[in-house]
Image (spheres, rainbow, N blue to C red):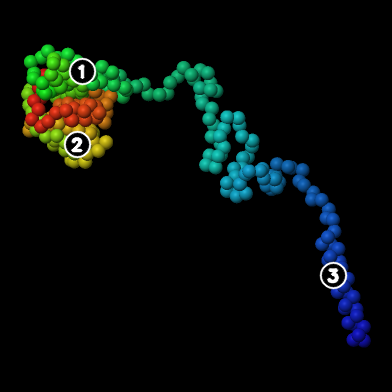
């Protein structure tokens, strides 16, 4: 009896393994797709295009095809690039840009400097001796008088209305990339306009005194460079004489402490 049971069990086991193997390698019936091919779960089965990322976070899924003229990237799925001007011809005649304010002496327009203010050698028949600096504030020129009736002329920016001055003094000190310590009166004056000036600023390209400074006596005035070359030829400063950094560097090498300076 026991022998019969063992044989029966063995036969059942063989039949079971055989059935599993045949089912495993059998050809399965095709998957029946939903007639709605735009269903989200169906869309996910589409083959990934060659060259796209396998990371789903890097792929953009659109609810409908992109419109012509849009840019698609990871951060912005749909951002129209066509402007109102392109879609509506009438909009071309409307400008939404704030009109530029006209240039004034106090706020000159940022543009290239007038070529007449570039350094050049000119004739000089004035009374000052060679080596003297003469500044004509009305014409916006600085002259370094040379021998033989000539002078080297540079364009300058001068004091704005109410800050102009004239007189004679001497260069008391020279400085390369000077520090800037605006006087208390200037700090207070600018504060009332909503501009807050530092008590001290180290020298450098961002410093308003520019690359070089020639100090005039014991006054607060200087001949110095500027990081705003488009202001040359205008009345813009608080009394100082400003030059292009290239020009003030050239002048700096040509004059010494004690040089006479005539401002007229």
Alpha-carbon neighbours of circle 3 within 10 Å: few (<14), some, or many (≥20)?
few
Secondary structure of the residue carrying tag 3 is: helix
Count of numbered tags: 3
Alpha-carbon neighbours of circle 1 within 10 Å: few (<14), some, or many (≥20)?
some
> Is 6 rendered above or below residue 234?
below
Which residue in the protein does label 1 denote? Answer: 121
Tell us which disc is closer to us: 3 or 2: 2
Which residue in the protein does label 3 denote? Answer: 17
**Going 19% across and 19% down the picture, which residue do you hit?**
153
Residue 140 in view here: no
Tell us which disc is closer to us: 2 or 1: 1
Contact between marks 3 and 2 (CB within 8 A): the answer is: no
> Is 19 rendered above or below residue 241?
below
In x, y percent, where is residue 53? 61, 46
User: From mark 2 to mark 1, how far is it between C-alphas?
Assistant: 25 Å
Question: In the image as oriented, which residue stretches furthest toward the front?
Answer: 148
In x, y percent, where is residue 16? 85, 70
> Is 40 rendered above or below residue 215?
below
Q: What is the number of the mark on residue 81?
A: none
Secondary structure of the residue carrying tag 2 is: strand
In x, y percent, where is residue 263? 11, 21
User: From mark 3 to mark 2, how far is it between C-alphas?
Assistant: 96 Å
Q: What is the number of the mark on residue 176?
A: 2
Res. 28 image quadrant: bottom right
N-terminal of the two: label 1 or label 3? Answer: 3
**Front residue of 208 and 163:** 208
Tell us which disc is closer to us: 1 or 3: 1
| Left-right relation of 165 to 111 | left
In x, y percent, where is residue 147? 13, 19
């Amino acid at each position: 009896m026991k022998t019969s049971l063992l044989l029966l069990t063995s036969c059942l086991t063989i039949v079971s393994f055989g059935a599993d193997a045949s089912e495993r390698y059998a050809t399965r019936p095709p998957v029946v797709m939903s007639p709605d091919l735009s269903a989200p779960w169906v869309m996910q089965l589409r083959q990934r295009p060659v060259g796209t990322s396998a990371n789903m976070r890097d792929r953009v899924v659109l609810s409908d095809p992109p419109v012509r003229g849009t840019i698609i990237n990871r951060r912005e799925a749909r951002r129209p690039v066509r402007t109102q001007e392109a879609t509506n011809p009438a909009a071309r005649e409307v400008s939404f840009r704030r009109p530029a304010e006209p240039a004034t002496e106090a706020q000159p327009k940022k543009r290239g400097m007038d070529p007449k203010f570039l350094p050049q050698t000119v004739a000089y028949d004035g009374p000052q001796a060679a080596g003297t600096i003469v500044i004509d504030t009305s014409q916006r020129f600085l002259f370094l008088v040379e021998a033989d009736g000539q002078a080297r002329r540079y364009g300058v920016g001068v004091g704005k209305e109410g800050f102009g001055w004239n007189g004679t003094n001497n260069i008391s000190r020279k400085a390369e990339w000077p520090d800037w310590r605006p006087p208390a009166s200037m700090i207070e004056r600018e504060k009332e306009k909503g501009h807050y000036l530092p008590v001290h600023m180290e020298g450098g390209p961002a410093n308003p005194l520019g690359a070089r400074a020639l100090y005039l006596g014991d006054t607060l005035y200087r001949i110095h460079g500027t990081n705003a070359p488009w202001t040359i030829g205008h009345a813009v400063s608080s009394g100082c004489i400003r030059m292009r950094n290239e020009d003030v560097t050239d002048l700096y090498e040509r004059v010494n402490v004690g040089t006479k300076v005539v401002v007229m």
